[in-house]
């Protein structure tokens, strides 16, 4: 009888421990689904958490509104979650709510877009693209490509289609775009405006530019969705995208590869959305009691174009058609 009671008690303890582990709540505040990149990013993270034994995902889509994210973060606190994954729709205005997260001692994992208060808050790890470098590569690719086709001395009119104003991706890529332009004095900015990272806004913005600006030689679009919207507008205006206007996107989504292979786009700069493995590894380390580095982790990312071989400084472009079958998003 004593042995049976001991076995029963042991079983209860095991089941209790398993139940406690199964209740490990991972909360994810995502900005919305404004692009193919964002959808792939959300799917990667959600799948990684939902497929992990013992983890429960609590997900909130902010629909591109900061007030929705602030509300979600406070709801996460109320629900007593074990860790929070956070991507901010803009970079400013997060100090108060993130300090509330810190006060509750909930581990905070920063994903993709980083808040400007990063030095004033506590977080366990941060992962995202090097937005300044991505912006630099966009312009460097265009400048070096123009040289390769004998237009390195020609006066070139450049339009920059920016992402959501105030988003860290927009801020960083714009900084990189403008810094790189200093190395190509023949390239002059004739238009610079936000398309909000969406195809739906990229198309009418390009339509407006084509009506108001005499000549655009190069379009730098800070994500592929806006570039693809611009392609539609350029075709509707009777011009040939990829030839009459050189188009450089960013993110390297599959649709951009399709456009490059078809000749409608010229290049895309990679910014991988596949953060799921990083999230799992980081949370597992947290559960194991490891202390993580607060240095922002940037993944290795490529440059893809029509023919390959363009040196953008430290990295050479790869022909999109050669690797299109390997794209996961």
Image: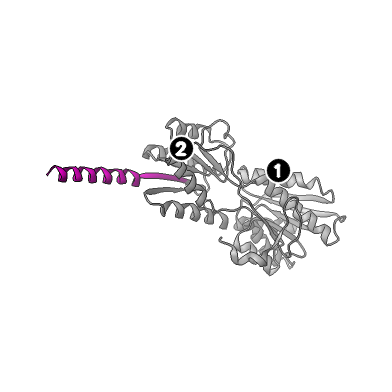
> As drawn, is 257 to the left or to the right of 83?
right
Spatial CA distance of label 2 from label 1 is 31 Å
Q: What is the magenta range? A: 1-28
Task: Tell me the residue that label 2 is attached to.
Answer: 107
Element at label 2: loop
- In the rendered image, residue 106, in percent from the top left (x then y), is placed at 43, 36
Q: Which mark is residue 249?
A: none
Q: Residue furthest left?
A: 1
Mark 1, residue position: 175
Crowd around label 2: few <14 · some 14–19 · many ≥20 (10 Å): some
- Kindly report which numbered mark, 2 or 1, lies closer to the viewer in this rendering: 2
- Closest to the observer: 67 or 58? 58
List x then y, in percent, for residue 2.
14, 42
Mark 1, secondary structure of its residue: helix
Frontmost residue, 275 versus 166? 275
What residue appears at the point 44 percent right and 30 percent down from the top-left corner?
A: 103
Q: Earlier in the sequence, mark 2 or mark 1?
A: 2
Whether residue 21 appears in magenta in the rendering, the answer is yes
Q: Is residue 306 left or right of residue 118?
A: right
Q: Farthest residue to the right: give it.
A: 153
Residue closest to the eye, 281 or 223: 281
């Amino acid at each position: 009888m004593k042995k049976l009671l001991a076995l029963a008690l042991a079983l209860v303890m095991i089941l209790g421990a398993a139940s406690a582990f199964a209740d490990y709540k991972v909360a994810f505040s995502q900005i919305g689904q404004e692009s193919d990149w964002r959808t792939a990013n959300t799917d990667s993270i959600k799948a990684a958490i939902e497929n992990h034994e013992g983890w429960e995902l609590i997900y909130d889509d902010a629909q591109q509104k900061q007030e929705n994210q602030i509300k979600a973060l406070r709801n996460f606190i109320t629900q007593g979650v074990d860790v929070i994954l956070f991507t901010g729709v803009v970079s400013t205005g997060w100090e108060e709510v993130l300090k509330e997260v810190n006060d509750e001692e909930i581990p905070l994992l920063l994903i993709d877009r980083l808040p400007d208060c990063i030095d004033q808050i506590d977080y366990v790890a941060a992962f995202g693209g090097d937005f300044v470098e991505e912006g630099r590569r966009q312009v460097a690719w265009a400048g070096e490509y123009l040289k390769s086709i004998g237009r390195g001395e020609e006066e070139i009119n450049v339009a920059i289609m920016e992402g959501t104003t105030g988003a860290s991706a927009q801020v960083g890529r714009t900084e990189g775009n403008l810094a790189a332009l200093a190395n190509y004095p023949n390239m002059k900015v004739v238009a610079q405006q936000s398309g909000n990272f969406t195809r739906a806004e990229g198309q009418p913005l390009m339509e407006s530019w084509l009506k108001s600006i005499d000549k655009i030689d190069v379009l730098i679009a800070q994500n592929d969705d806006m570039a693809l919207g611009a392609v539609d507008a350029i075709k509707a205006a009777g011009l040939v995208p990829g030839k009459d206007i050189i188009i450089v996107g960013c993110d390297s989504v599959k649709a951009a590869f399709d456009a490059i292979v078809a000749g409608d786009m010229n290049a895309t700069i990679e910014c991988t959305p596949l953060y799921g493995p990083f999230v799992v590894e980081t949370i597992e380390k947290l559960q194991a009691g490891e202390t993580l580095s607060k240095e922002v982790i940037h993944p290795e990312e490529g440059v893809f174009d029509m023919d390959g071989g363009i040196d953008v400084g430290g990295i050479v472009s790869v022909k999109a058609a050669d690797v299109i079958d390997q794209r996961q998003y």
